[in-house]
Amino acid sequence: MSKAARLSEKWFNRALWLVAFVFAWFLLGLGTAIIRDLPHVEQTYSIEDFVDHATIDPLRAQLETLQQQHTETNDKLDQAQLTLNTRRNDYQAMRRTFENWLATRDVTQQNQQDDELVGRTATLDQLKALERDAEKAVETLSKKQLDQNQAENKIRTQVNQLENDASQALYNANQKQSTRVFLYRLLLALPLLALAGWMFAKKRKTPYWPFVWGFIIFALITFFVELVPYLPDYGGYVRYLVGIVITVLGGKYAISALQTYLEKQKLAESQPQLLRREELNYDTALTLLNKGVCPGCERGIDLKDTRNDFCQHCGIGLHNKCNACGARKSAFSKFCQGCGASASV
Ligand SMILES: [Zn+2]
Ligand SMILES: [Zn+2]
């Protein structure tokens, strides 16, 4: 693109590339904004959208009631356990007192204290009975707790089963949705890519090339970068297939361009010198000469050798003599550097 020899032209070209990138950037921003504000085809599903509510709701209610009862039973059991401990301690304490009393009584042989013995034994029996009652309460509550646990587990298993089924359905629905979203985006991105291809083929050499390139960059990024987060399982195939098609088309284009160039070059080299030189672009010729390349055949030449008046590859004249002053000058320059006379005279 940049064969310009003039300094300002070079800088203008750079600025125009900047225009191309800025244009692409704004197009991308606009594209993103449009996509964001499009009517949303996506929907956020949750597991609740897929459970069988007729079955699961009563089960869940039952489970909740059971859990409440369970908590109550646990609290009651804690209390009963505490009571049991207290009564057990009471009994043990009384029993120790009784044993001490009994020992003292044996030593002193006070057999007349039988009334007191009966009284103390009765108290001990009473305490033992209370302890036994507390024990029974604990046992009953433990049994209740176990029953409730088992009932709860049974219902929980059913609820879990139903939720598992629903989560499978949720997964399927999400898969289907992401495929749909991908296809919508593909439908938007593919025409852009096709248009970019057409612009590349037909419009990239027009004076409006910065916009063409800006659009091409935009289309490529849209297709190969922005589509990526929406790729479903097979989306990779689509991307690579399109990539392959583009590469094949681009490669074919490059190959035929090379053929065309070679044919044109061959044809040009068979034409008379003056005609060939006229067909060459002045700026292009200067750029090539600066690089030590023949403007006629684009092969390397040694311009420093002052005997090199003609290209040894294609025979095009590289240096000639000024018609006015006879100085040796480049055959491509328009004016003589010695006297300023026009070369065409
Ligand atoms: Zn040549
Ligand atoms: Zn001259």
Image (cartoon, rainbow, N blue to C red):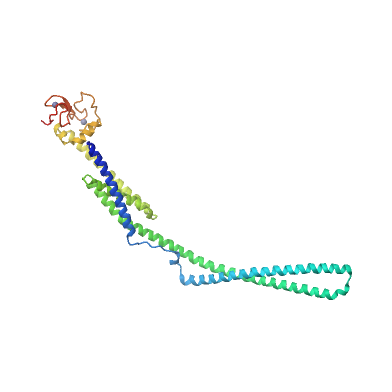
Residue 268 vs residue 84, the one in the foreground: 84
Residue 317 vs residue 328, the one in the foreground: 328
Residue 115 vs residue 281, the one in the foreground: 115
Residue 216: in sight, yes or no? no
Of all residues shown, which one is farthest toward the right? 109
Residue 111 vs residue 280, the one in the foreground: 111
Taking 129 as reference, is 290 above or below it?
above
Q: Residue at x 32, y 48 (%)?
A: 244
**Residue 112: quarter of image:** bottom right
> Residue 277, how many percent across, how many down?
16, 33
Taking 28 as reference, is 41 above or below it?
below
Count of numbered tags: 0
Taking 69 as reference, is 250 above or below it?
above
Indicate the quadrant containing the C terminus: top left, top right, bottom left or bottom right: top left
Of all residues shown, which one is farthest toward the bottom? 115
Of all residues shown, which one is farthest toward the left? 345
Residue 290: in sight, yes or no? yes
State ligand 1's quadrant: top left
**Residue 145: quarter of image:** bottom right
Lateral position of residue 298 relative to residue 86, left or right: left
Taking 2 as reference, is 326 above or below it?
above
> Residue 28, how many percent across, how many down?
31, 52
Indicate the quadrant containing the N terminus: top left, top right, bottom left or bottom right: top left
> Residue 271, how many percent across, how many down?
15, 33
> Residue 227, how many percent across, how many down?
35, 53
Lateral position of residue 72 relative to residue 206, left or right: right
Q: Residue at x 16, y 36 (%)?
A: 279
